[in-house]
Each structure stands twice: as C-alpha cells, then as structure tokens.
Image (cartoon, helix red, strand yellow):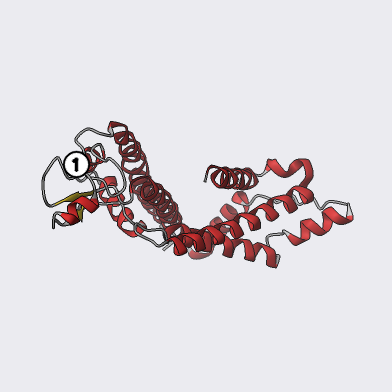
Amino acid sequence: MTSIPAIGNVGIVILIMFLMFAILSMNLYAGKMHSCSIVSSQITRKEQCLAARGTWSSYVQNLDNVPQAMLVLFDLANGEDWNDVMYEATNLAGVDEAMIAGNSPGNAWFFIFFECIGNFFLMNLFVGVLFLNFEKSQRDEQEAMLLDRSEVQWVDMMKMICEAKPEIIKIPKGRIRKWAWHFTGDEAPFANFIMGCILLNVVTMAAVFEGMSAAYDGGLEKINLFFTAAFTLEMILKMVAHGGNYFDAGWNKFDCFVVSASYLDIIMQ
C-alpha cells in the first residue's frame, strides 16, 4: 500500500506528458491524415473527392482530436507499429488535402522524438518506480522480521524525522508586498482560483478538434485570453511579494515561461 502514492505520482506525470504531446500533435496534424477512396492524381482536395462521389476518410491512427491522439501516442509509446504512423505522416500535404508520397519528411522527427521520450523514458520510468518500491518493501519486510512492533514503529518515526526538511518562510516587511504575499499564499483563496484556472485551461486546450466552427474557435480564444490575464496577474503579484527572490523557486520560473509563451502565441496568431 505504501507504493501506491509513488506509483500514482509517476502515473500523473506520464498522463500530463501524454496530454501535452497529444495537444501538440493535434495542432500539427489535425485534418491532414485523410485520403479519398478514389485513387487519382487529379483529386488533391476534399472538395474534389466529394464532387467525384468519393469518400473522404481519415487514417485509422489519426490525430484529429485529443482523445484519439492520446490513444495513438499510447500505441507509439508501446512501440507497436510506430514507424507505420511515422511514414504516414511523411506523406501529409495540408488540411483537407490528399496525401503526397514523401511530401513532408520532416514530420518524422516528431515521432522519433516522442518515441525516445515515450518509450525509452516514460515507460521505463514507470517500470523503474515499480521495481524500486518493490525492492524497498521487500527490504523493509526483511528488517521487520528481526524487530518487534514497537521497534518497527520507532524506526519508521526516525526515518520520518531524518527525511523531514524544515521550510524557511520569509515574510516581506512592506505593506503592499506583505499584502501580495498573503494574497498569493498557498492557503489563500487566490491559489485555489489559479489552480481552477489551470485545470480549466487544460480542458479548454483539449476541447479543440478538427472541423470546429468559427464561433466555437472564437469562444475558445476568448477563454484563453481570460486565463492568460489570470496567470499574468498571478505572476505580477508574486513578483511584487517576493521581489528579487521571485526566480529562486522553480515553479515561478515555469510560470514566467508559460506566461511569456502565451503572449508569444497571441502575437503570432
């Protein structure tokens, strides 16, 4: 039972990584893995295929939406015919355009990169955590056989004391900085608001799919702008609260990077 939290944490990390790659792959290849049932060099677009009374169908392992992309990436991480999907991606031409053999060879690098991350790193990480926790449980069980119940409890308490790390909290002295520090604290309601924004933002990013209407896309863009404004407000308040020590925390560096990337995405659009 003691292994479940560690395994659960690794599972959450793997799920987040898969979700990130699913969103990225959907933005890169959604609507491109399609072909016409009529094989002809004259048919290069979806409209021409439908006009010729053909069927415009998607490749079995397509990346048109996030759930489908998650399933495809899971197959790739298992190493199951991942090269077939990679070779199919090298034939992509564009959205609602027929595939052209060898048209986009650069797409292969995405699948090679994910295979290295998903198969060689994430899957081995999960298996490694399983073996590590199994070995730890086996060692603890062997040690417990030589001790009685009270001695085992004492050893566990000593381990907890040795592993505990005191947290040094520096409260700013200025009135405005002190208010910002309390307002953005981990136990403050604003922190729960930001966590809710993060979860909803992930849901919004995963809600994109091939063939969505312009009104639907515009609504997602407005929601994304709201979340960007909320994250920017959090970053500014934390900068006011922590001053020059803001970048000492790794999460603050990550927040700053995400906010900067969001504005770069808005400018590029």
Q: Residue at x 58, y 62 (%)?
A: 197
Q: Is residue 147 visible?
A: no
SS of the residue at dot 1?
helix
Where does residue 23 sit, x and y in percent of width and height? 41, 51
- Expressed as whole percent of the image width and height from the top left, the position of residue 16 reads 44, 53
Q: Which residue is farthest bottom?
A: 189
Quadrant containing the N terminus is bottom left
Packing grade of label 1 (10 A; few <14, some 14-19, many >=20) is: few
Q: Residue at x 79, y 57 (%)?
A: 180
Write down the quadrant of residue 207 in the picture: bottom left
* Residue at 23% in and 52% down: 46
Answer above or below: position of 22 versus 113.
below
Image: 134 above or below 82: below
User: Which of the 4 image quadrants contains residue 70?
Assistant: bottom left
For disc 1, the marked residue is 84
Name the one closer to the observer, 25 or 180: 25
- Pinpoint residue 228: horizontal percent, then vertical percent: 61, 54
Nearest the viewer among 213 and 227 is 213
Q: Is residue 9 visible?
A: yes
User: Relative to residue 122, is residue 152 drawn left or right?
Assistant: right
| Marker count (numbered) | 1
Residue type at mark 1: give it.
Asp
